[in-house]
Image (cartoon, helix red, strand yellow):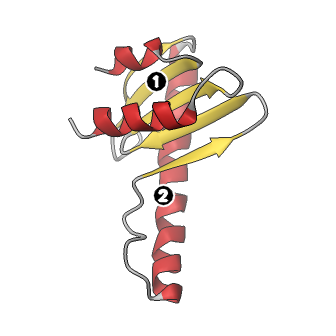
Amino acid sequence: MLRRLLALDGVNAICQFRDDGAFVEGYGLLDQPQMERLARFALEYKRIVQGNADQLSMFTQMRGWTPPRGWVVRAAQGTVCSVGNLVCLVDTAEGSINEVMQELNEAATY
């Protein structure tokens, strides 16, 4: 299931991690230690996004902010996208973030 995301334009790596941050599996151009660091980054960023969404929900009194479904960090050359416990590294110039997020969303529901 994860490997099919590598077929998307610009996707350089995809990995899955557990709720404790442990690396489960990964595929792509990164080596094992880099995949493990990507998974750890994704877990920590997921926690930050959850905290921010909780605060936003509390301060605005608007429903629907939590739990956040996913997040994107975009830079000039690379973009990191995550949904659930899946994280993907994408070449910003070559990939379609909308397409990647849609595929991540589908893969995360299985």
Q: Which residue is drawn at 46% across and 24% down?
A: 14
Q: What residue type is labelled 2?
A: Arg
Residue position marked by numbered label 2 in the rendering: 47
**Quadrant of residue 48 in the image?**
bottom right
Camera-nearest label, 1 or 2: 1
Q: Where is residue 31 in the image (x, y as percent from the top left)?
A: 55, 12
Q: Nearer the viewer, residue 71 or 25?
A: 71
Q: Which residue is drawn at 59% across and 36% down?
A: 80
Up/down of 39 relative to 60, above or below: above
- Other residues around mark 1 within 10 Å, as few (<14) / some (14–19) / many (≥20): many
Q: Residue 101 carries which label?
A: none
Q: Which amino acid does label 1 sit on?
A: Ile
Q: What element carries label 2?
A: helix
Up/down of 70 relative to 24, above or below: below
Q: What element carries label 1?
A: strand
> From the viewer's perspective, is 54 left or right of 3?
right
Q: Where is residue 73 in the image (x, y as percent from the top left)?
A: 64, 44
Count the numbered circles shown: 2
Quadrant location of the N terminus in the rendered image: top left
> From the viewer's perspective, is 93 left or right of 52?
right
Quadrant location of the C terminus in the rendered image: top left
Query: Could you tell me if residue 33 is visible in this image?
Result: no
Query: Could you tell me if residue 24 is visible in this image?
Result: yes
Up/down of 21 relative to 1, above or below: below
Q: Earlier in the sequence, mark 1 or mark 2?
A: 1
Q: Nearer the viewer, residue 101 or 22?
A: 101
Residue position marked by numbered label 1 in the rendering: 14
